[in-house]
Amino acid sequence: MHLPELMTAIDPAQPGGPEVLVPVERPVPAPGPGEVLIRVAAAGVNRPDVLQRMGGYPPPPGVTSILGLEVAGEIVAVGADVPPEMVGQPMCALIAGGGYASYAVAPLGQCLPVPEGLSMVEAAAMPETLFTVWTNLFERGYASEGDIALVHGGTSGIGTMAISLCKLFGVTVIVTAGSDDKVAACLAHGADHAINYKTEDFVARVKELTEGRGVNVVLDMVGGDYVARNMKCMAEDGRHVSIAVQGGAMATVPVFEIMRRRLTLTGSTLRARDEAFKTLVADELARAVWPFVADGRLRPVIDRTFPLAEAAEAHRRMESGAHMGKIVLTV
């Protein structure tokens, strides 16, 4: 297959506001051993992209400065150790960078096949949130059938995916959101309960909803003073999983409460984990979750799509906080 030498990409020359996201030309990357080259049809937009654009979340060493952590498209070239028959296969992939472009390289182990009935836009909206929610809520947080989970940011890409997975795996899910419209949207999507954190005290409401018992697991992307408040929402032996610090990187917590009620506080970041770990997660998702995608029972919530050239508008949309679900760039 003949490939061009240059491609369109969003690779900001310096940190800044959304206006730094302008299309430029970059060389088409070549897949290395164990990697595939994907002609990108769509790329998901995520909060870490915004942080990287602002200069607060640099890519790991050796990773391209082109933004974008998830893509969907067709494999057009393969590196050494990859069967040539993979060329032509529709795939979505979790990547460490490079998604906002016409072509992107992905480790084959971090790819999942795009089944019939799943659009490229939907496929591009899944890897980052699916890997994140699965590894944190279900693996680190041990969420399982019969549990109650508290998830902050119910209308975010993470929040909507968490609701979907909780419904599939028998977990009761309580979410928080910042307006009555967002509360209604979360309930419509399948949340068991949704709390407007601007008009209600979520701690008191969770206690009421759980008849004083508390929740088994918390998925938190706020940090700061939310951590101590979340602990008040937790049942004995509860697990608290931190995945972002949008409200502050430092927290003061009552240590004796952790001891007395046997609470677990943990957390993780995904981007810096090695390929072996992400391949392991992809294998688990292929077994445990992807059948629900194949039969149409799991679909991402798509807020809006933008052409690649309008990446700045996509970031403005994300920063406005008005979105419900995922924002996706089409290439």
Image: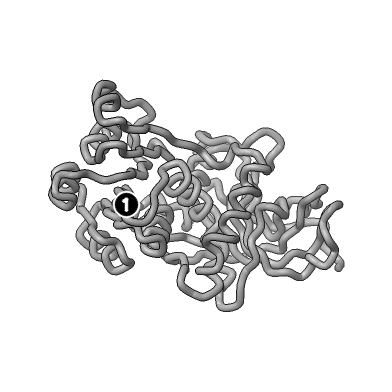
- At 46% from the left edge and 65% from the top edge, which residue is drawn? 300
| Other-residue count near label 1 (Cα within 10 Å), few / some / many at <14 / 14–19 / ≥20 | some
204 vs 311: above or below = above
Lateral position of residue 127 relative to residue 203, left or right: right
- Tell me if I can see residue 317 in this picture: no
Identify the image quadrant of the N terminus.
Answer: bottom right
Query: Residue reaching furthest bottom?
Result: 117
Q: Position of residue 246 (x, y in %)?
A: 37, 38
Quarter occupied by residue 145:
bottom left
Res. 260 in view: yes
Give the residue displayed 35% in from the left and 39% down from the top: 239
- Horizontally, is 167 left or right of 49 in the view? left
Tell me which residue sits at (61%, 72%) in the image: 115
Q: Amino acid at mark 1?
A: Asp
* Residue at which label 1 appears: 147
Q: Position of residue 220 (x, y in %)?
A: 35, 42
Total marks shown come to 1
In the drawing, does residue 219 fall left or right of residue 215? right
Q: Position of residue 157 (x, y in %)?
A: 43, 56
Pick the front one: 141 or 306? 141
